[in-house]
Image (tube, helix red, strand yellow):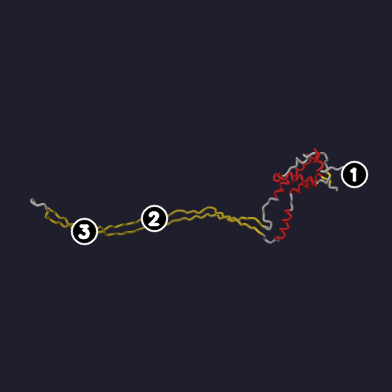
Amino acid sequence: MAHATLSLLGLYKYDNTVLDGLQLPSEMEPDRETIKDNLLLETAELEIIYPDPDLMKAAITAWSRKELHVWEELYATTQYEYNPIWNKDGTYKEIHTETRDLTETRDLQESRNLAGSSLEGVTGNSNTKDYVFGYNSSQAAQSEEHTTTTGGSDNITTTSTGTVDNDGTVKDQGTIKHEIEHIEQGNIGVTSTQSMIREQREVVMLNMMNVIIESFRQRFCLLVY
């Protein structure tokens, strides 16, 4: 005996708030109406297990809240930035550490005994003339002339004696750390470029809307045609 069936689309026409409790990743909120439209169309030929609108609405809210974390993680994988034909893209560090603990003791002594001398002399002449005026003349007349001769020398002796000590301890202690970062990128040959392209096509085919719709079908629809 045939019996009447009710699809999600039929229930939505009766109560268009039945999908209001659907939880979605925040990044997919702008696509909410697109997801709802496709969900209604792709389940239009399938009977739902809860024909009561209030029960169905509560069930959808609880189910989507449970699946939300999975959808968020799956969505995040579609946003990774990478080169699809590289199978190595990473860095590693080399760290070298050198510890120094060196001590040098100095005990040096230098004796000085230096002497030197120099001779400095000065020689020269100077002339002095005296003039007088006559009682009846305005012109001066020389009366006397004196010549003076100077000369002599200075002998200077310099002596530097003594002892210079250079004693002490020099220490070189501490740790020196060297870090070298290496970047490795590209295809290292374990997988062909063509194989990675085929795998990338599979990644591209992951559509989060299809994931949500298929999960709804499995949970709420009687998959009997």
Q: Please tell me whether mark 1 sits on a helix, a strand or a loop.
A: loop
Q: Looking at the rendered structure, which numbered label has been put on residue 124?
A: 3
Q: Nearer the viewer, mark 3 or mark 1?
A: 1
Q: Residue at x 74, y 53 (%)?
A: 205
Q: Is residue 223 left or right of residue 181?
A: right
Image location (x, y in percent) of residue 74: 72, 49
* In the displayed structure image, the side of residue 196 where residue 126 appears, left or right: left
Q: Amino acid at mark 3?
A: Gly
Left of 54 or right of it: where is 79?
left
Please name whichever residue, 78 or 99, is drawn nearer the observer in this view of the structure: 78
Where disc 3 sits, the SS reads strand
List the residue tagged with mark 2: 164
Q: Point out the tag, 1 or 2, that comes first from the N-terminus.
A: 1
* Quadrant where the image shows the N terminus: top right
List x then y, in percent, for residue 160.
33, 56
Residue that label 1 marks? 2
| Amino acid type, label 2 | Val
Q: Is 151 drawn above or below residue 218 in the view shown?
A: below
**Front: mark 3 or 2:** 3
Of the two numbered discs 3 and 1 on the same chain, state the one appearing first in sequence.
1
Looking at the picture, how far across and down is residue 200, in whole percent?
72, 56
Q: Amino acid at mark 1?
A: Ala
For image coordinates 66% across by 59% down, the residue present is 186
Of marks 3 and 2, which one's residue comes earlier in the chain?
3
